[in-house]
Amino acid sequence: MDSEFSKYLTEVLKFAGIVGLSVVVGKLSVFVLDRVVRKLTKKTETVLDDLILEAVERPISYLIILLGVYVAVERVDLDLGEEFLTITANVLFILVVVFLVKLAYDIINAMVTWYGMAAAERGRAEIGQSIVPLLKKLVKIFVIVSGLIVVLDHFEYNISSLVAALGVSSLAIGLAAKDTLSNMISGFIIMADRPFRVGDRIDVDGKVGDVEDIGLRSTKVRNLDNNIVILPNTRLVDNVVTNLAYPENSVRNVVKICVLYGSDVERVKAVMLEAARSIPEVLPEPEPVVFFTDHGESALEFTLAYCIREYRDKFKALDMVHTAIDRRFREESIGMAYPTRTLHIIKDN
């Protein structure tokens, strides 16, 4: 009787010792992380290590304590009934997996958050607004499914059928939502490649507008009529897109003028250059240039090319340059051409 009691007491003390040791180690881990590791992370330039430390500091201590209790239940020979010990061990195993899943999610979530912050500092706030929330949701789903598979495998459930079912379901969802998925992938490509940014003016198949928002499925563009046009991202990836705001906001305008045959070519070119240079919006560098480009059917054709500071002033500059050319032509008595036809009437005698 004494030997049995002594053995029982020994097992109880062993159980208490393992649990107590895990508590001490858990508290010690928090102390080391808070007092030692945190000082080291504060000396680094990046905030990633600070975010990871903040995420793992408390969960690690709880995880160590849970592991200690789980090991104690598994290793200590206490006569508490086989069913009770089995249920307790299984519950503790599930709790350990839950904490591991939480720990993994917090670490990856900290890394994703840091990526969004770094992107915002580089002027890519759209990544933090669109990609980061999606990545967090995908990570959450992935770690939960992984933890569920680990638990089912522990209880000797056949997970191959579950994996197959998930694969078939994913294929069915992918086929049903292939256009949406294609647009989302294109959204990732746009945000990673950055062919344009919010506020840029773009030209897509002759349609011009300012980018208002870049989403995962579509991009919102405000056209010149002040209406919002929603473009699927696949269209922006598969077609040629001209970014009028990149690499700078200046843009070139072209004006074609036709004058009467017999006009002084050199004088016409000089007058057109004077008219362009008199407009404040026209940049002095690169200089405006005029080319005599064609002998037309009814006129001599000239092409004026000049650059303006801001692409948003394109039509304003066109109006001012055309007005100035018209005024100078009137002052210089240079005739503007228009299509003419000469009819010869032959009378039969």
Image: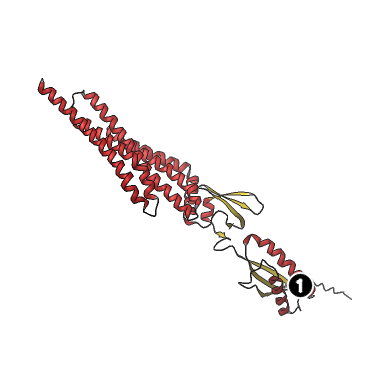
- Where is residue 181 drawn, in percent x and y? 47, 46
| Vertical placement of residue 135 versus 295, above or below | above
The residue wearing badge 1 is: 328
Quadrant containing the C terminus in the rendered view: bottom right
- Viewer-nearest residue: 340 or 345: 340
The part of the image, by quadrant, that contains residue 294 is bottom right
> x, y percentage for residue 209?
61, 55
* Mark 1 neighbour density, 10 Å: few (under 14) some (14–19) many (20 or more): some
Residue farthest along the right direction in this orientation:
349
Looking at the image, which residue sits at the far top? 1
Residue drawn at x 29%, y 42% is 29
Residue 139 visible in rendering: yes
Residue 227 spot, x, y in % from top left: 64, 49
Residue at 35% over, 45% down: 53
Indicate left or right for 211 with 193 as reference. right
**Image spot of residue 87 (x, y percent):** 26, 26
Would residue 61 be found to the left or right of residue 348 on screen? left
- Residue 338 seen in this snapshot: no
